[in-house]
Image: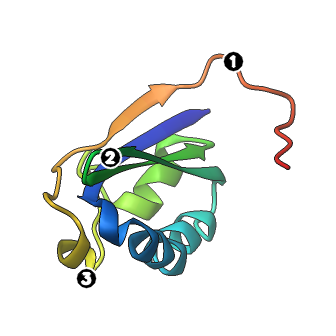
Amino acid sequence: MIARMWHGMTLASRADEYLDYLNETGVPDLQGTEGNLGVYVLRRFEGDRAHFWIISLWKSLEAIQAFAGPNPEIARYYPRDPEYLLELEPNVVHCEVLVKPPQVWLE
C-alpha cells in the first residue's frame, strides 16, 4: 500500500469554506479513482493560518497515476484552489505503508 500526502495552507477565516470545497472536489475525486483505499483530511490551525493535509491510500503506483497523471510526484490542483490556498506547493510525497490499524473507529 502507498500513502500519497499533500499539504496546503489557507487563511484560518476560510478554513471551513475550503474544507467544504475539498469535500466537493478532491475528496470524491480521490475516492472515486479505482485503486484508492481511503482518504484522510487533516487540519491544524496555527495563528491566522490553517494547514490541511490530505493522505490518500492506494493499492499501487499505477492507481495513483490514474488519479494524478504520469508524473505522480506533481501535486494535482482544482480550478478554484488558488482562491483559497496561500501557495500551490508543486509536489506531494509518497510513502510505503508498513503498518496500518485493522480498523479505525471515529465517534
Identify residue type, mark 1. Answer: Val
Asked if the residue at tag 2 contacts the one at tag 3, i.e. Cβ–Cβ closer than 8 Å, the answer is: no
Q: Are marks 3 and 1 in contact (CB under 8 Å)?
A: no
Real-space Cα distance between discs 3 and 1?
35 Å
Mark 1, Cα crowd under 10 Å, few <14 / some 14-19 / many 20+, is few
Q: Position of residue 34 (x, y in %)?
A: 63, 63
| Circle 3 residues within 10 Å: few <14, some 14–19, many ≥20 | few
- Horizontal placement of 5 versus 63: left or right? left
Q: Quadrant for the N terminus, please.
A: top right
User: Which mark sits nearer the N-terminus, 1 or 2?
Assistant: 2
Task: Please tell me which of labels 3 and 1 falls first in the chain.
Answer: 3
Residue displayed at 17% across by 73% down: 82
Can you identify the residue that label 2 sits on? 7
The percent position of residue 12, horizontal first and vertical second, equals 32, 60
Residue 27 picture location, percent across and down: 54, 67
Q: Nearer the viewer, mark 1 or mark 2?
A: 2
Tell me whether the residue at label 1 lies in contact with that at label 2, contact meaning CB atoms closer than 8 angstroms. Answer: no
- Asked which secondary structure carries label 1, the reply is loop
* Residue 79 badge: 3
Residue at x-position 72% and y-position 25%: 100
Q: CA distance from mark 1 to mark 2?
A: 22 Å
For the point 46% across and 70% down, the residue is 16
The one of 14 and 69 positioned closer to us in this rendering = 14
Query: Circle 1 is placed at which residue position?
Result: 99
**Mark 3 vs mark 2: which is more N-terminal?**
2
Question: Is 1 above or below relative to 25?
Answer: above
